[in-house]
Image (cartoon, rainbow, N blue to C red):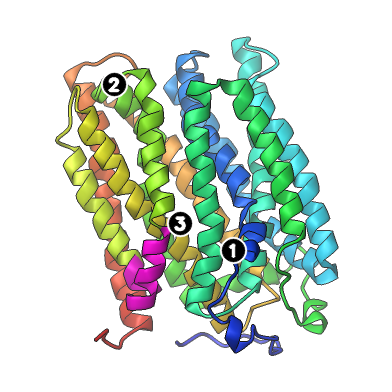
Amino acid sequence: MQHRKTHHPVTTLPQINSSQSDALSVREGMLYGFLGFPLAFCALPLYVLLPNLYARDFQVPLATLGALLLGSRLFDALIDPILGRWCDRLFAKSIRSLLGFAAGAAVLLGAGFSLLFFPPSRDPKLLLLVTGVLLVITYSAYSAVAVAHQSWGAMLGGSETFRSRIVAWREGLGLAGVVLASITPSVFGLPVLVAVFLVSLAVGWLAWTRALKPQTASAQLATVAPIGQPDLWHPWRNAAFRRLLGVFMLNGIASAVPATLILFFVQDRLQAPEAMQPLFLGSFFLCGALSMPLWLRAVKTIGLARSWLLGMAISIAVFLWATQLGVGDTTAFVVVCALSGLALGSDLALPGALLAGVIADGGDRGRAEGAYFGWWNFATKLNLALAAGVALPMLAVFGYTPGVRDPEGLRALTIAYCLLPCALKALAAIALQIFIIRHTYPRKIP
């Protein structure tokens, strides 16, 4: 793999010994990965339930809601790289400093999440102002915890298989959190949703403090540049990172659009009973969690990049089928959710492992993971911002109004929910094949 040379001295970091190159005990995986549970548990309500709640129950117009979500998510995305470099500096100081920073961010995250679902006022003008402030606080706190946690996992290093297992534990437990979050509001209500999140967030942070510690070159870490200096842009000097990030963004937008629109599709296109929503969401995320061992096996057989390509192909096929669904096709949509959940497993477990390899191959392990994951999360948030800020207003322009089921509006909803993600996934798959698989893994798989 070719990389542009950097001008910093590279210190060889201690490596996981050969007997640990692929091994990760259940206890080690749980201690590190459990924080993924509350982070994903709150992500689904924030990105899927919250827009629907504010549009239907609080009567916020779609265009206004889209603009509010776009603005808050763009601000959140812009500060992610700074948070990443901050994490690098804190880790350079001590592991305790990094964990303390994450603890403070977790407190803000819990408070912001709670107030978003139980706003102090429902006066239309005050509601928008308070919601905008709370969204910025909640998204920023979420980013701080997530970047620190992801960077920690990448610092552990190891082989492709080991890196895949680290990410799979984090994302697999995250999917378990999402499954529970998809069921809890309908079955137990929003107060229980908030309570479960707060308890699991505290448990996740405590487990993380007892997790496998990264090995670092402390002398090199002491030279990490202050926030705001050019080193913030260091990941962009790595050509492999630029290629991977481009694919990740195309694929991420393709996934974010249906995540934003799924409840609208279920309620108006399928006209499914509200009681079925937990089944749809639960089957999607449960199958994503159960697919993790299958994707780890695929990585052993065909490698990380080709396994991700296979996941994209499955997703495209499933969403093309979904264009044929209409009123009452609830059983078929459960199958759509299950198969797209299978593809979701590849999106969650494999790109992060590829990024960890890019960091290690570029000589940046143990010194710049925060910077890389800061930009990585910037891309993730930008994807979500574009999905909400573009898809919702576009639906309004093309005649779709929630609850009003005229043919033209429903046709626009189907195109936005099914065909737009297929087109974006196809572009991502082509980019993955050309810029990563052919460029990085030219040898043929027997």
Q: Amino acid at mark 3?
A: Leu
Which residue, given by chain and number where applicable, does mark 1 sit on?
A: 26
Q: Residue at x 71, y 37 (%)?
A: 199
Which residue, given by chain and number where applicable, does mark 2 sit on?
A: 272
Query: In the image, is residue 206 above or below residue 299?
Result: above
Which residue, given by chain and number where applicable, does mark 3 sit on?
A: 348
Residue 294 magenta-highlighted: yes
Which is more foreground, mark 2 or mark 1?
A: 1
What element does badge 3 sit on? helix
Q: Amino acid at mark 2?
A: Ala
Question: Quadrant of the image for the C terminus?
Answer: bottom left
Label whose residue precedes the other's in the sequence (2 or 3): 2
Q: Residue at x 32, y 18 (%)?
A: 273
Label whose residue precedes the other's in the sequence (2 or 1): 1
Question: Quadrant of the image for the N terminus?
Answer: bottom left
Q: 208 left or right of 67?
A: right
Q: Amino acid at mark 1?
A: Val
> Looking at the image, which is closer to me, 305 or 410?
305
In the image as oriented, which residue stretches furthest toward the top?
A: 123
Q: Residue at x 45, y 56 (%)?
A: 348
Q: 113 left or right of 315?
A: right
Query: In the image, is residue 59 above or below residue 266?
Result: above
Measured from the top left, where is residue 204 in percent x and y? 69, 49
In the image as oriented, which residue stretches furthest toward the left?
A: 324
What element does badge 1 sit on? helix
